[in-house]
Image: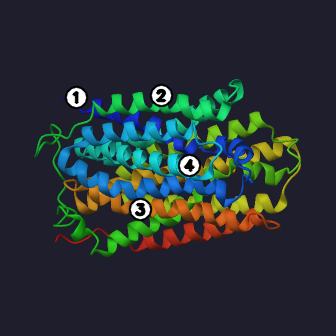
Amino acid sequence: MNRWMVIVGALLIQLALGAVYAFSIFTSPLSESLGYDSKSFAILGIFSAAIAVFAVTMIVAGRVQDRRGPRLVATVGGLVYGAGYLVAAFSTESLALMYLSYGVIAGIGLGLGYVCPLAAAVKWFPDKRGLVSGIAVAGFGAGAFLFTQIGKWIIDISSSGLSDAFLYLGLIFLVMIVGGAQLLRDPPKGWLPKGYVPPDNGGRMNHEFDWRDMVRTRQFFMLFTMFLLSATAGLMMIANVKNLAQYLDPSGSLLVVAQFQTIAGMVALFNGAGRIAWGKVSDTLGRANTMKVMFLVQAVVLLGAAGFFLVRPSGEIVQFAGLTALASGVGFTFGGNFALFPSTTAEYFGTKNMGMNYGLVFNGYGAAGVVGGLIPGFMANAEDGFVWVFVAIALASFAAFGIALVTRPPAKG
């Protein structure tokens, strides 16, 4: 089969799954229907719950897809993910049901669907792991942009806006993911691209680790911790674009709704672009070296954001341009995580057990989902609260850089 068909299926699946990052369009309507402040952890925790469940489910999904192949698991993931949105359509006035539908059911669907196209892609493209990992998950960022616009449009035109948005989006996602899943399959055992010769790494990075071997290595804990520290910044930004705009201009007269949608869309586009760009760079520069550069860039952007929110400049153009640039910068570096960590996991621990192994590494991202919701929930309501949020996550990015400095591939087991 043409191996690029796997990428087509991966993009269809990831476009739909990436809609989870459009959560910021639901915060205000949910705040009104549930009676909680949009910056409260009661609301932001719905998104955090989905991310945490997503990451935990990936462990089980990865284990099953390693044994049964990606098509079956991704198909079930599409059915469950769509069902989560459909149940959410009838849960908009109950906080508990919203956590169950969007946070748990959709989160399970995310975990089931996400790992399969990624694991299949790195097996078909050992010669382009960074680039293909980036392309395979670029749809996740692009899907956030696309479905931010579609979801907001449905909310605006429908008499039952929030419920109808969940309902119609759920149906769309079900069709996209189940359809894309039919294009996934693993290559034959021992298959290599024509003309490709695996590099001689002196006995390193050539061993197929199972998950028990992997978790005994310090490299696993380094990857997990770097993922946690780096992803916290992006998740905080994604869930709080509208809150950041209101923080700059509490009156709401300057950063109007249309501008907020533009900013959220730009974050999604840069998120997707970062996945491809950082993945491509890592094929040349190496995974660890690319991580070092990416973490430093992210830390600098975050410190710039802290300064921007400390000054709180006035004027519509300055506020709009500044928030757009800073949020896009964070989105660009955040996206790189999803190209670098799966390709690094494949190189360090092999591809045979890629689903399970990356599922465990990916739980660093799940932990970041909780931390990324807790930090602004506890700090942002204070005077200059978002300033200290950005300082905190900038320090986390510097810590990730420090870990990347000493990260080396594991010795052959």
Q: Earlier in the sequence, mark 1 or mark 3?
A: 1
- Nearer the observer: mark 2 or 4; the answer is 4
Q: Residue at x 15, y 39 (%)?
A: 195
* Dot 2 and dot 3 residues touching (CB under 8 Å): no
Which residue matches tag 3?
363
Location of the N terminus (image quadrant): top left
Name the one closer to the observer, 81 or 230: 81
Location of the C terminus (image quadrant): bottom left
Q: Is residue 23 above or below residue 235?
A: above
Q: Residue at x 54, y 28 (%)?
A: 168
Disc 2 from disc 1: Cα separation = 27 Å
Disc 2 from disc 4: Cα separation = 22 Å
Q: Residue at x 42, y 43 (%)?
A: 137
Disc 1 from disc 3: Cα separation = 32 Å
Q: Point out residue 62 in the picture as x, y percentages from the top left corner.
A: 29, 53
Q: Amino acid at mark 3?
A: Asn
Q: Earlier in the sequence, mark 2 or mark 3?
A: 2
Disc 4 from disc 1: Cα separation = 43 Å
Which residue matches tag 1?
2
Q: Point out residue 47 in the picture as x, y percentages from the top left corner.
A: 57, 52
Q: Amino acid at mark 1?
A: Asn
Where is residue 72, by image quadrant?
top left
Does the rendering let one see residue 163?
A: yes
Q: Residues within 10 Å of mark 2 (few under 14, many from 20)?
A: few
